[in-house]
Image: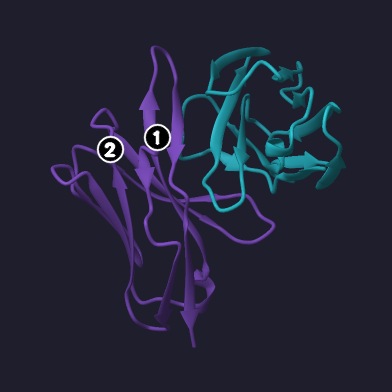
Chain colours: A purple, B cyan
């Protein structure tokens, strides 16, 4: 049962334009979300996060939007640059009694065309 | 600081064999987590170690076991390998509780034939 879904396996965007990556979740207990970026032969690196008490978080060219009622979040990258070409993972925090774990989506491969 | 390092980078085993993967956390990090990433999927949480004890476990069978040493390094052991265990195994470390400061290693690619 996939609790975090990234329905687009890949996305191609022209350099300079906006990239929008989408993520849907099913578990209403998730209260914190993160986006990771992964280059080939490297581990994922943290990009940006958002708490469920917010609907937007911005960090430079990256903005994450959260729509709790729709259980949907999106990552906007503007303007897109060639170095943004990577696989992007959406992840949600599932809290236990004294700890938590990350539940990940399958990832979206972003290709920035020159 | 070398960040999170993992060894080996690649490994080929046959069904039924046992494998040990190793992870050295980033300097100053005391919590280590292991993830399995099958082809075309996101990472799946296996377990987490803190103070040399398994603190949390994902939905993985007992064939998957681990260990954390006093220097915070960690091992992942998988017994009785199955073809479906073929995946990228990622180790992540962080200092205490903060998830944003979790760093991932490059992973070990395991192929089971």
The chain identifier of the residue carrying mark 2 reads A
Instruction: Give the number of the disc on residue A1.
Output: 1
* Vertical position of residue A43 compared to residue A13: above or below: above
Residue B1 at least partly seen: no
Residue A28 place in picture, x, y as percent: 23, 31
Residue A42 placement, left or right of A45: right
N-terminal of the two: label 1 or label 2?
Answer: 1
Instruction: Give the number of the disc on residue A26.
Output: 2
* Vertical position of residue A35 compared to residue A94: above or below: below
Closer to the observer: label 1 or label 2? Answer: 1
Q: How many marks?
A: 2
Q: Residue at x 65, y 61 (%)?
A: A40
Residue A69 placement, left or right of A47: left
Q: Residue at x 44, y 19 (%)?
A: A99
Residue A90 at least partly seen: yes
**What crowding class fits label 2: few (fewer than 14 Cα within 10 Å), some (14-19), or many (20 or more)?**
some
Residue B101 place in picture, x, y as percent: 51, 39
Q: Alpha-carbon distance for marks 1 and 2?
A: 10 Å
* Viewer-side residue, A59 vs B44: B44
Q: Residue at x 82, y 47 (%)?
A: B10
Direction bottom: furthest residue? A114
* Viewer-side residue, B82 vs B3: B82
- SS at circle 2: loop
Residue A101 place in picture, x, y as percent: 46, 28
Residue A57 placement, left or right of A104: left
Residue B58 place in picture, x, y as percent: 53, 23
């Amino acid at each position: 049962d996939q609790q975090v879904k990234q329905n687009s396996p890949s996305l191609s965007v022209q350099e300079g334009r906006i990239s929008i990556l989408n993520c849907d979740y099913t578990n209403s207990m998730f209260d914190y979300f993160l986006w990771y970026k992964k280059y080939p032969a490297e581990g994922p690196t943290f990009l940006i996060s958002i708490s469920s008490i917010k609907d937007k978080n911005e960090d430079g060219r990256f903005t994450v939007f959260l729509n709790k009622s729709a259980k949907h979040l999106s990552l906007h990258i503007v303007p897109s640059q060639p170095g943004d070409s990577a696989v992007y993972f959406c992840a949600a925090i599932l809290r236990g009694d004294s700890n938590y774990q990350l539940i990940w989506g399958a990832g979206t491969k972003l290709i920035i065309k020159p | 600081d070398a960040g999170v390092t993992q060894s080996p980078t690649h490994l080929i085993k046959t069904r039924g064999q046992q494998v040990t993967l190793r992870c050295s956390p980033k300097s100053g990090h005391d919590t280590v987590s292991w993830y399995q990433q099958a082809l075309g999927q996101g990472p799946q949480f296996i377990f987490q170690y803190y103070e040399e004890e398994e603190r949390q476990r994902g939905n993985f069978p007992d064939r998957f076991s681990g260990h954390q040493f006093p220097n915070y390094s960690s091992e992942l052991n998988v017994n009785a390998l199955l073809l479906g265990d073929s995946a990228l195994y990622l180790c992540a470390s962080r200092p205490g509780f903060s998830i944003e400061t979790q760093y991932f290693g490059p992973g070990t690619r395991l192929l089971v034939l």
